[in-house]
């Protein structure tokens, strides 16, 4: 029987990062790519042995109460108390309960999206996942507008909203949250201790202003389960990125999965410079050794799955 070859046959450590993109040319080309249904189903089944997106996408109200103590996943010695606000915002049932979609888009934040013209194609998918509250309005032609689920690492509040230092920044965040208009806001609140206040601020804003979002806070076991799945498939990631977490979850409820904005390299396939994010001036620190992420390694695994038809990566212009 056919194997799922996730780690592919590409050369392992790449030292000269300036040339890295050459090694990642996407084959087969967009027009030749075919979805491999059998393989997708096999991957879903394998992942289900480690986690269940329907359950692990969020802790539910019934399982915690205000005052409960939680140890952070990456800082086991630090704890947080479940606040009344957090408790109020925990969903009663999984936002993905019994959900199945024909095609899903997962939109990463690489600058490779700029001038891609992928907006319409992205918006045509049944379910669209975005990362870290990335702006859409000003970039709609390239990234689309439709958002069914958006993640928000607590660090985003610092990076993109100046830690809400004044009323202007609070208003900016509030407007962004209002624009989500009923979609799922996925907040990894239990990962690392640094985000404690930031999560609380966001929770408070949502409740105070009756923001129409469906909040979700990933389960305590999700990260290790995701890492476990990839490690079993010989993909030695340190800490899975948001993008990889989303792909792993999406295999549960999406028939076909299309990835956009995944390109952790400073040059594109034609050797033109690519911004780290399509919307800000953050640099390529995350691909360095010091980073908690191993994005190029993840990319290699995703590329291999693209070549086998389990997912489709778009790293250039849309047709
Ligand atoms: N991504 C990518 N190439 C880039 C930037 C991002 O492939 N140049 C993908 C990664 O999978 C990443 C996702 O897009 O997880 C979202 O980008 P970002 O907001 O930068 O995510 P993280 O780095 O995972 O978030 P954080 O730094 O808050 O942990």
Image: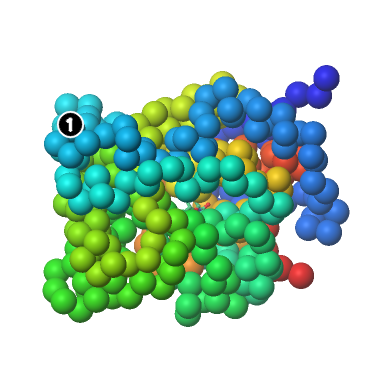
| Rendered image quadrant of residue 235 | top right
Name the spot of residue 18 as percent of width and height, x first: 54, 53
Vertically, is 151 above or below 97? Answer: below
Label 1 residue SS: strand
Number of labels in the image equals: 1
Residue beneath the point at 29% across and 51% down: 89
Q: Quadrant of the N terminus?
A: top right
Vertically, is 72 above or below 83? Answer: above
Vertically, is 106 above or below 277? Answer: above
Q: Which residue is mark 1?
A: 69
Between 64 and 274, the one nearer to me in the picture: 64
Residue beneath the point at 54% across and 72% down: 145
Name the spot of residue 77 as percent of width and height, x first: 17, 27
**Residue furthest toward the right?**
32
Q: Is residue 125 left or right of residue 157?
A: right
Q: Is residue 255 left or right of residue 271?
A: right
Vertically, is 222 above or below 168? Answer: above
| Rendered image quadrant of residue 191 | top left
Residue beneath the point at 47% across and 35% down: 55
Q: Does mark 1's beta carbon lie closer than 8 Å to ligand 1?
A: no
Q: Quadrant of the C terminus?
A: bottom right
Q: Is residue 199 visible?
A: yes
Q: Is residue 15 visible?
A: no
Between 44 and 119, the one nearer to me in the picture: 44
Name the spot of residue 82 as percent of width and height, x first: 19, 40
Graded by Cα atoms within 10 Å as few (under 14), some (14 to 19) or many (20 or more), the crowding at tag 1 reads some
Q: Is residue 33 left or right of residue 87?
A: right
In the rendered view, how is the structure colored? rainbow
Name the spot of residue 241 as percent of width and height, x first: 45, 44
Between 16 and 190, the one nearer to me in the picture: 190
Residue beneath the point at 17% across and 31% down: 69
């Amino acid at each position: 029987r056919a194997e799922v070859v996730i780690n592919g046959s590409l050369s392992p450590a790449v030292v000269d990062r300036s040339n890295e993109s050459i090694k990642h040319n996407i084959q087969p080309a967009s027009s030749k790519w075919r979805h491999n249904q059998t393989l997708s189903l096999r991957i879903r089944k394998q992942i289900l042995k480690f986690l269940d997106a329907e359950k692990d996408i969020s802790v539910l109200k019934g399982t915690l109460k205000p005052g409960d103590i939680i140890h952070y996943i990456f800082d086991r010695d630090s704890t947080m108390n479940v606040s009344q606000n957090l408790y109020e915002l925990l969903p009663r049932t999984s936002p993905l309960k019994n959900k199945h979609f024909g095609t899903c888009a997962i939109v990463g934040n690489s600058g490779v999206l700029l001038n891609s013209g992928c907006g319409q194609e992205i918006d045509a998918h049944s379910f669209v996942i975005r990362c870290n509250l990335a702006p859409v309005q000003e970039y709609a032609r390239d990234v689309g507008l439709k958002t069914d689920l958006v993640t928000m690492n607590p660090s985003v509040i610092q990076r993109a909203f100046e830690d809400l230092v004044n009323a202007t920044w609070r208003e900016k965040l509030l407007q962004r949250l209002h624009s989500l208009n009923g979609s799922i806001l996925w907040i990894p609140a239990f990962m690392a201790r640094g985000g404690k206040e930031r999560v609380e601020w966001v929770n408070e804003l949502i409740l105070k202003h009756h923001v129409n979002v469906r909040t979700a806070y990933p389960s305590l076991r999700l990260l290790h389960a995701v890492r476990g799945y990839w490690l079993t498939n010989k993909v030695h990631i340190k800490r899975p990125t948001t993008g990889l977490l989303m792909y792993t979850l999406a295999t549960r409820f999406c028939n076909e999965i299309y990835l956009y904005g995944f390109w952790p390299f400073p040059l594109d396939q034609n050797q033109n410079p690519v911004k780290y994010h399509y919307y800000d001036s953050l640099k390529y620190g995350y691909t360095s050794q010091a980073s908690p992420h191993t994005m190029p390694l993840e990319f290699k695994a995703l590329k291999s799955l693209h070549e086998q038809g389990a997912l489709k990566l778009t790293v250039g212009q849309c047709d």
